[in-house]
Image (cartoon, rainbow, N blue to C red):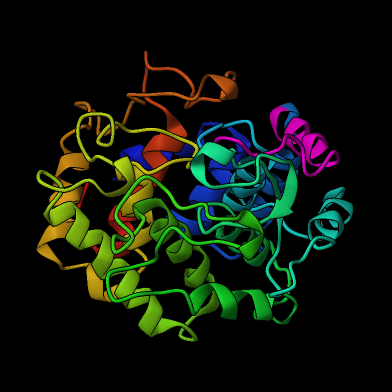
Amino acid sequence: MSDSIAWLLGSEPYIRYRTMLDLQERSPEDSEVLHARTEMLAMPLVKSLLADLYSWPGDTITNHKKATLHYHKLAFLADIGVQADDPGMQDSIGRILEHVSDQGVLELPLNIPIVFGGTGNDQWSWVLCDTPRLYASLLKMGVPQATLQQGLDVLSSLVRDNGFPCAGSPRNGRFRGPGKQSDPCPYATLMMISALLQVGDAYSAELGTAAEGLLTLWQHSREHAPYLFKTGTDFRKLKAPFVWYDILHVADALSQINRVKTDPRFLEMIDIIRDKANSDGLYTPESIWMAWKGWDFAQKKQPSPWITFLVLRIFKRIGVHA
């Protein structure tokens, strides 16, 4: 892995920053780490994302898979290490926290068509396939848990014995996704895992149930694809940033749960990912979000430092050699 890390340290500032923190375990106060972070915040691509958030909330959500949605941009900024007290973020976070449902859950602008049981109108609301991502991002950025506690309690209470369902605010009318009512929603379950991972042991039972839900879905993926979330060829393609339900996104989340790290079902995913390395141990994107053109992971012709970093971080967490 040492050659791969050397390669990462020679790449873009945001990758150098995360590599030093997550793979080399260097102190955030290390002078080289601080320098990389300063350079990261000065990157034109990063500054562009930060500027986009000034217009929060951005587009009304009609398709959660749309990679340009503001809450996906917020999630990526949180993933690379942008913090709530960084220039420009305080105003954006203030606008995010302005919209809270009667249940105490953060809201986003949604439009669920009448044909799917919604109201057909633009409205501030929430569903488990978007709002948990806000909680994960804000907690990563250092927003106090106390500020978000009520919403976390409401969202976590929706867990069932097979994961998290397609659920949301009463404002959404009769909306329910295209699956059996008893099925877990794979994406909602993944989103909830990402959020609950940020709060330590407080929701360990819910986190364990959700993780088992995803592993069971993987185990039976050839005969069952709830809510149309298949785990075939497209699911297995390496892709960034984390927007949708795919193997790298799922593996990244599960790799942070101790009880999962030696599970044969999870290790099967790891074997699939590891087999995608080139002869130098680097990883090339196999699918891209065109909206993220300009980033190293938004091309399929050469290895991506960010994709490679994500894979190596998973391996480091679980103690598996590259």
Vertical placement of residue 267 versus 122, above or below: below
Q: Residue at x 40, y 45 (%)?
A: 310
Magenta span has 59?
yes
Q: Is residue 36 left or right of residue 248?
A: right
Residue 49, image quadrant: top right
Q: Is residue 159 left or right of residue 68?
A: left
| Magenta-tinted stretch | 45-63
Q: Nearer the viewer, residue 60 or 174?
A: 174
Query: Could one spot residue 261 in this view of the protein?
Result: yes
Residue 103, image quadrant: bottom right
Vertical placement of residue 198 versus 98, above or below: below
Q: Position of residue 231 (x, y in %)?
A: 22, 40
Vertical placement of residue 132 versus 199, above or below: above
Q: Nearer the viewer, residue 9 or 81?
A: 81
Q: Nearer the viewer, residue 102 or 315?
A: 102
Q: Nearer the viewer, residue 90 or 129?
A: 129
Q: Residue at x 33, y 46 (%)?
A: 227
Q: Position of residue 61 (x, y in %)?
A: 64, 39
